Amino acid sequence: MAHHSPRLLLFDVDGTLILSQGVAGRLMLKAVETVSGKSFDYDVRDFAGFTDRLIMRRLLQRAGVPDSELEEKLQQAERLYLQWIAERFRNPHFVKVLPGVRELLERLEAENGFYPGLLTGNIREGARIKLGSVGLWDYFPVGAFGDDAEDRNQLPPVALRRAREHYGIDFRPEDTWIIGDAPNDVRCARANRIRSLAVASGVIPAEELQAEGPDVLLPDLRNVEEVLRILKK
């Protein structure tokens, strides 16, 4: 039996639950290049922990799209991106579920007192396509997504409200964990007085995550017993 108070666990997607060889990032870039008529170089680390819309907005601005056309071009790029990832992720041989993730999610379902959700920069439909391609979407009945706010720090209140509505529990920030692989995940947790479990399973090295001062840092979610012990704290 769980003797801890209920825990809301908000998971990031890319680099935390799955890796997809940068396929989605390249398609997002291609969508922006298509609607703006410009091409650019980018570093995948520029994307880590930012919301999809903020990434696309910055790229469109870098391409010189005038403010008056920005919203329209952003919508066009988003539509193209979602269409293309839906096609690519139909055959998800390139998607890797990270170590321990499936086992952890099954354990969270079986144990009392744990309530999973998502907190991700992905547009909701993008998260559904990615996680659905490997059978993980249904573990997460609630979440806050990149189309709820462009600034990641504004997502936790959205997630807390949806979790309260869905689970019927008024989760306090101190009963909540944000689990992610980027400095922005840690900063977002801190800005909302929520605890952070950082995992060095994405593109950001462990020492860079440690420098952000997460409550806990792990190499990945492989040691399920240890992860459960931490999350009960």
Image (spheres, grey):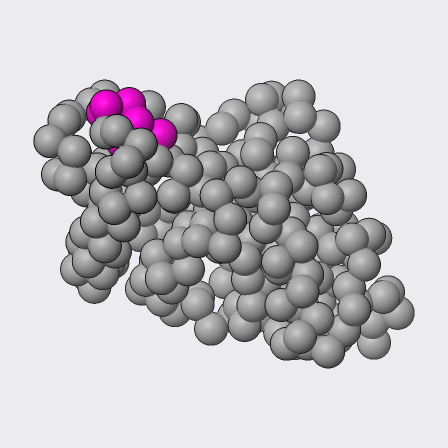
Q: Residue at x 16, y 33 (%)?
A: 36
With 204 as the anchor, is 40 left or right in this view?
A: left
Q: Which residues are magenta?
A: 58-64
Number of residue marks: 0
- Decide whether residue 101 is among the magenta residues: no
Q: x%, y% of residue 149?
A: 51, 48
Look at the picture and state if 99 lies above or below 26.
Answer: below
Look at the picture and state if 77 lies above or below 117.
Answer: above
Q: Residue at x 28, y 36 (%)?
A: 68
Q: x%, y% of residue 98?
A: 45, 50
User: Toward the viewer: 206 or 191?
Assistant: 191
Q: Residue at x 68, y 42 (%)?
A: 189
Name the magenta segment's main secondary structure.
helix
Task: Please indicate, yes or no, whether residue 93 appears anywhere in the rendered image.
Answer: no
Q: x%, y% of residue 180?
A: 57, 43
User: Toward the viewer: 191 or 176?
Assistant: 191
Q: Quadrant of residue 46?
A: top left
User: Toward the viewer: 133 or 51?
Assistant: 51
